[in-house]
Image (cartoon, rainbow, N blue to C red):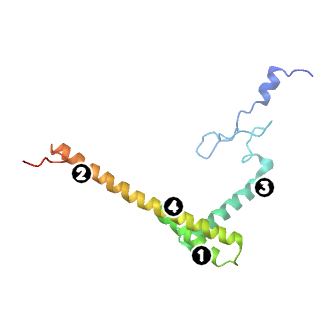
Amino acid sequence: MASRSLFDRAATLNRGCTTTTADGQPCGSPALRGERFCNMHHPDHADEVAEARRLGGLRRRKEATLASVYDLGEPGTIEGATRLIHIAALESLSLQNSVPRNRTLIAAASASVRVIETTELEARIAALESAVGLDAKRQQRDEPAFPESEP
């Protein structure tokens, strides 16, 4: 087996896509092996890229529609998580009784308990932080946290 020359190896190194974006910046994606363009900018893949963009747009529209219909709210919040669990439980209740349905309902109940615990812990932490904040204000005014009673 003959070893490849340094020139041959350098020619096959992936230098990245040679296309520039609309704002004049380089694409930044890796080029396809042995090509000058990435998958998104390669002329031979234009139909595939167009279909992928179309499907991505459909998914985003479907996502927005479902979020609106189910009034999901923000998924990273306690309220959003609670709403999602509620919807999953209601949808599962409408299914025919089965072992998977029951497992889903148990999982929803378990998730609800975790949300309740998290909400309670959040309230307790807020109360503790508030108490610590009051203590810090007392120290700024040189007031003792526990005033000594006079004998």
Q: Amino acid at mark 1?
A: Leu
Q: Which residue is mark 4?
A: 114
Determine the CA span between mark 3 and mark 4: 47 Å
Q: Earlier in the sequence, mark 1 or mark 3?
A: 3
Question: Which percent across, then down, holds residue 127?
Answer: 32, 56
Question: Which percent across, then down, holds residue 76?
Answer: 51, 58
Above or below, 93 relative to 79: below
Above or below, 21 relative to 119: above
Q: Which residue is mark 1?
A: 90
Q: Amino acid at mark 2?
A: Leu
Q: Which residue is mark 2?
A: 134
* Side of 140 where 124 appears, left or right: right
Mark 1 secondary-structure assignment: helix
Asked if the residues shown at circle 1 and circle 4 are in contact, with their CB atoms under 8 angstroms apart, the answer is no
Question: Which percent across, then down, holds residue 4?
Answer: 85, 22
Which numbered circle lies on residue 47?
3
Q: Earlier in the sequence, mark 1 or mark 2?
A: 1
Residue drawn at 77 percent across, 54 percent down: 48
Determine the CA span between mark 1 and mark 4: 18 Å
* Side of 1 where 19 appears, left or right: left
The quarter holding residue 33 reads top right
The single residue placed furthest to the front in the displayed view is 151
